[in-house]
Image (spheres, rainbow, N blue to C red):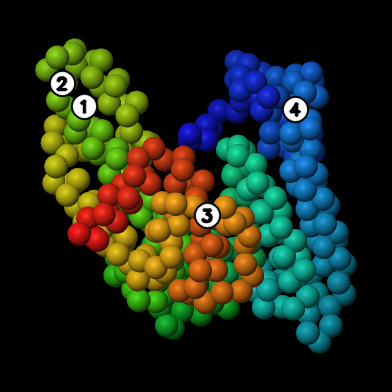
């Protein structure tokens, strides 16, 4: 089930007409009232305490870093003078590790607020350390184009960084997406993005079959509910009665990305289709084609696949058709 942007009570799943309060400790879980929060305390307290301790550790590391007077290896005023160069400066590494621990703590909670908090932290980490690719389409396209240029100076803060905005998600795949040096995490993310687009287009195409049976006003309302925002905001697609050409193009892209991910790491698709019980660990070291790399990417992406109805089944069909 997809996460809802509209918060719900973690105990009873009610929206309470928008009158919800946040957990004061983690700020990413909501409740109708104090009684519901108390009833849910035993279920929530472990992950809540992990977030609370991670944030406390981060505050301590930031305080230490801001108080650092500077020396021959570490510039003073790091947060003002060294943005973009964190991690390359050894003294910033405990802070960056603590920042990432906060991300991991948030991702243990299945709420939209928790995912948004994790995303916000990762975006700021990218700001602090440009060379860090811990990181959909704009980000992946930037790394596949500007970010993959051999002469791009990662230390030059005057150069554009992650400055691809509102790229056309329906455009042909840029060459860098299918490069032999591409990253599995980006390929998997783009595959899911394209599958979501494909599912939307197929839903629109199927809705056209009932067009003559219902009033246009009702049909438009149905079609608007069938698709995600990126398709809904594309007037050309929404007004088209036949999505067949675009469906075929996106199917080709999904196939190309599926094949590229298989080349990058043969372990990923089989495990996505049949997860193993011991995939909770997040290894610190791995090689690109190793099971450990698969495990790392799986842990960060599986919830997104699970929350997209039809996505995993589409990969299952691709696997069968490619095996035959």
Q: Nearer the viewer, mark 1 or mark 3?
A: 3
* Residue at horizontal 78 percent and vertical 80 percent from the top: 74
What SS does tag 1 mark?
helix
The image quarter containing residue 214 is: top left
Position of residue 40 relative to residue 300, above or below, is: above
Q: Which residue in the structure is indicated by mark 1?
A: 207
Mark positioned earlier in the residue sequence (1 or 3): 1
Mark positioned earlier in the residue sequence (4 or 2): 4
Q: Which residue in the structure is indicated by mark 2?
A: 211
Q: Which residue in the structure is indicated by mark 3?
A: 276
Mark positioned earlier in the residue sequence (2 or 3): 2
Density class for disc 1 (Cα within 10 Å; few <14, some 14-19, many ≥20) is: some
What SS does tag 2 mark?
loop
Give the percent coordinates (x, y) of residue 49: 80, 44
Going by the image, does 51 lie left or right of 142?
A: right
Q: Nearer the viewer, residue 206 or 174?
A: 206
Q: Nearer the viewer, mark 4 or mark 2?
A: 4
Mark positioned earlier in the residue sequence (1 or 4): 4
* Residue at horizontal 23 percent and vertical 19 percent from the top: 219
Q: CA distance from mark 2 to mark 1?
A: 7 Å
Mark positioned earlier in the residue sequence (4 or 3): 4
Q: Which residue in the structure is indicated by mark 4?
A: 40
Position of residue 104 relative to residue 74, above or below, is: above
Q: CA distance from mark 4 to mark 2?
A: 46 Å
Q: CA distance from mark 1 to mark 4?
A: 41 Å
């Amino acid at each position: 089930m997809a996460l809802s942007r509209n918060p719900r009570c973690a105990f009873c799943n009610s929206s309470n007409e928008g009158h919800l309060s946040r957990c004061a400790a983690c700020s990413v879980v909501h409740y109708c009232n104090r009684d519901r929060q108390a009833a849910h305390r035993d279920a929530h307290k472990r992950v809540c305490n992990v977030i609370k301790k991670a944030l406390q550790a981060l505050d301590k590391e930031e305080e230490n870093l801001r108080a650092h007077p500077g020396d021959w290896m570490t510039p003073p005023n790091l947060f003002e003078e060294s943005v973009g160069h964190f991690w390359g400066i050894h003294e910033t590494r405990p802070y960056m590790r603590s920042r990432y621990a906060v991300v991991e703590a948030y991702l243990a909670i299945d709420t939209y607020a928790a995912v948004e908090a994790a995303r916000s932290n990762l975006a700021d980490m990218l700001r602090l350390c440009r060379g860090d690719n811990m990181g959909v389409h704009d980000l992946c396209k930037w790394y596949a184009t500007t970010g993959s240029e051999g002469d791009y100076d990662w230390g030059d803060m005057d150069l554009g960084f992650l400055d691809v905005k509102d790229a056309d998600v329906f455009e042909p795949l840029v060459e860098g997406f299918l490069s032999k040096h591409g990253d599995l995490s980006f390929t998997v993310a783009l595959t899911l993005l394209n599958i979501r687009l494909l599912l939307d287009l197929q839903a629109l195409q199927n809705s056209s079959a009932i067009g003559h049976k219902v009033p246009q006003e009702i049909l438009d309302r149905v079609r608007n509910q069938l698709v995600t925002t990126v398709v809904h905001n594309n007037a050309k697609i929404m007004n088209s009665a036949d999505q067949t050409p675009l469906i075929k193009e996106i199917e080709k892209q999904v196939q190309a990305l599926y094949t590229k991910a298989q080349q990058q790491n043969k372990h990923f698709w089989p495990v996505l289709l049949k997860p193993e019980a011991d995939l909770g660990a997040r290894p610190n070291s791995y090689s690109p084609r190793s099971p450990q790399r698969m495990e790392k990417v799986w842990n960060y992406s599986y919830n997104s696949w699970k929350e997209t109805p039809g996505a995993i089944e589409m990969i299952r069909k691709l696997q069968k058709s490619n095996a035959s």
